[in-house]
Amino acid sequence: MAQKMTNAEWQAFVSHGTRTGKLSTVRADGSPHVSPVWFVLDGDRHLIFNTGKNTVKGRNLARDGRVALCVDDDRPPFAYVVIQGRAELIEELGQVREAATRIAARYMGPERAEEFGARNGVPGELLVRVRIEKVSAEGGVAD
């Protein structure tokens, strides 16, 4: 049986450990494109991730900023969060590098954050800032 999560619960769920998001963007022909992303919440109304300007998702986002991001736990009692929103693309290298370092700290650990921030905070990389517009979140209830 599923139970709706509160704001605090879904924010804690998506921020737990190294859960990745499955990001859906809109291709030029209107079909979906899904790819995994590393991300962090940025306050309670935004999330951020990095991508290359010339990647499929980078090109899709430049044309159409609508996104959906799914984060799930596929172990019983199961849970998921789906976030919908609109992306803003930022190329300013200081912001790109700062975000890349924050994201790397989550996924690679604080000891490697600067290394990955430097690697991903370069020309051609984007900071994607998604304004969260809608959240659907349910968690399973253990029996």
Image (spheres, rainbow, N blue to C red):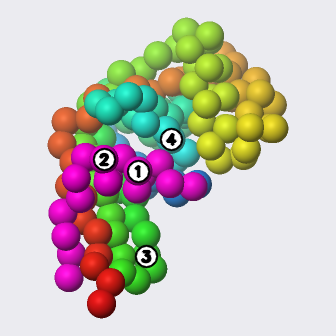
Image quadrant in which you'd find residue 44: top left
Mark 3 residue element: loop
Q: Amino acid at mark 2?
A: Ala
- Mark 3: few/some/many CA within 10 Å (<14, 14-19, 20+): few
Q: Secondary structure at mark 1?
A: helix
Which label belongs to residue 39?
4
Q: Amino acid at mark 4?
A: Phe
Decide which of 94, 66 is in the foreground and name it.
Answer: 94
Neighbor class of circle 1 (other Cα within 10 Å; few <14, some 14-19, many 20+) is few
The secondary element bearing badge 2 is classed as helix
Total label count? 4
| Among the two numbered marks 2 and 4 on one chain, the one whose residue lies closer to the N terminus | 2
Image coordinates of residue 17 in percent, x first then y, are 57, 55
Determine which residue is flagged by label 1: 12
Q: Does label 1 or label 4 sit earlier along the sequence? A: 1
The alpha-carbon separation of the residues under discs 4 and 3 comes to 19 Å
